[in-house]
Structures are given as C-alpha cells and as structure tokens.
Amino acid sequence: MAEFMDPQKDGTEIPLKDPFVAGFLAWMVPGMGHFYQGRTAKGALYLVCILGTFVYGLYLSGSSQVGWGRAVYMSFRTNDLRLPWLCQIGVGLPTLPLTLLQSNFVGHGQTPMWNGFMAPPELEFPEANAFRNEPAAHKSLSEIQRMLPQYFEMGTVYTMIAGLLNILAIYDACCGPVPAEMGRKEEDDPTDDSNANLEKTA
Amino acid sequence: MTNIINLWFAAPLVVSVSLVYAATRHEDGGAILHHALRVAGWIVSFMAIIFGILWMVSSQVS
C-alpha cells in the first residue's frame, strides 16, 4: 500500500497511509481514520469532541416518554422535509444505517425499533389529541416538541454541528492538517522558493 | 433569566468546535490547544457582540 507523507512546516512528516481508506473510516466513526493512520491523540480528540457532541444531542432530544434521539431521523415526506439529517449523516455509522432502517419501518407502516430511537415521528393529524397515551414510537412531531420544549431544537443543533465537524475531521484524515500560517506566508511572499518550485513543476 | 441560563448550552459547543477546528490546523498538541483558545475567544467575543446588540434592540422594543 502506498504511503502518502504530508510534510509540515516544521519538517515533520505525517503518515497518511491510504487517504481514501482513512477518509472513509473517519466518516464511519469520528477519529477512526486517525487511529488507522497511527495519529492516536488526534483520533481520541475527534472521537471525544465529535461523538460526545453527537451523543449529548441525542440525549437532549429525547426522554423516556418520547424515546431518545428523536432529533435525528430521515424524512422526506410532504410537510416533513428533514434537511438537518443531511448534516447529521456526517457522523456516519452512528446515524446512517439506523435512520434508513427506522425510516423504512415507518414508511411501511411498521412500528420502529427501540422505542422510536432515531425514528421519524408520526405526521400531524387532526385527532392527535386523542392519542396522548400512545407509545413513544408513535408520537407526533408536534407532541415531541411540546414535551421537549426547546431541547428538541438544541438536540438538532448539537447533532448537526457534530456531523459538520466530522467533515473537517475527514478532510484532516485524507489530506493532513491545513497549514494556515504557511499558506498565508506564501501568499504574502511571492519570491518564496516553494512557489517557484511549484511553477517549475507546472 | 431562563434565556441566560440557556446560554450555558453553548459552552460544550464552543469547546468542541474550537478544539476540532484547531486540530485540523495543527498536529502538535500544544499548538492545537493554543489555537483552540484563540478560536474560542473569537467565538465568545462574536456571541457577546450579537448578544449585546439583541439585548439593546429588545430593551428598546419593550
């Protein structure tokens, strides 16, 4: 397997191994791509920060009455276009398979698994008030929001940010750290040797 | 008062966003922490400015 080494400004080289495998692993589980590359400290940092944010979002957007993780679900139904899901799937394995499965259950009129964990809520219907004592898996979106005032939205924000942060981690696994200071210095100094070398190779 | 207490929900987000952002810029742990502190400062300052503006607007309206 070809090893790609990314030279940093201080001369150290980072073993990126196979960038595509690392990127895919980083998408599946935050930090996993970095563990694969042997960058364990950064992998642990990404795992704790991103997965911690995601899990806290799941906790905020649920309760024993309505089920846990209700802010993370896939729905492209009329009146329920769940665009935050596109950000949430940035976390990968903890989100994508289960949301697809639960959405499939609800789409076929079946009861979702695990007390409605990451399952799309029932759509609003006129006689909703008559079904207050339904199991968590059959709660409607408005009922969930009523029972979790503000926390449903906070859970949505937390899980969305976790997904978006993991995109940065995927980039880091594929290409190494962005040398921001070095890039700025090169822009400022047109006579820099590294720029001249780039022009020659082009 | 409840809204001010709710601001504490931003704290874990500021910590994780600044740490992850800084980690995508550096490989060394010390550099990551230093950059994360700078980013967290920027985020908190930006939030404070927006908070101040909204506070003034709301006090003018009510």
Image (tube, coloured by chain):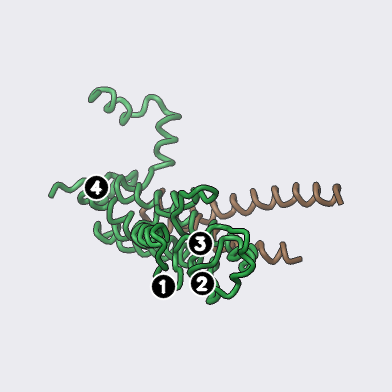
Q: Nearer the viewer, residue A113 or B17?
A: A113
Are discs 4 and 3 less than 8 Å apart at CB?
A: no
Label whose residue precedes the other's in the sequence (1 or 3): 1
Secondary element at tag 3: loop
Q: Chain of mark 3?
A: A
Marks 2 and 1 belong to one chain:
yes
Label whose residue precedes the other's in the sequence (3 or 2): 3
Residue A114 has which mark?
A: 1
Identity of the amino acid at label 1? Trp
Which quadrant of the rendered structure holds the C terminus of chain A? top left
Q: Chain of mark 2?
A: A
Q: Residue furthest left?
A: A1
**Depth-wise, is mark 4 or mark 3 nearer the camera?**
3
Label whose residue precedes the other's in the sequence (4 or 2): 4
Regarding residue A147, the answer to whether it shows in the image is yes
Q: How many marks?
A: 4
Residue identifier under label 2: A136
Residue A20 has which mark?
A: 4
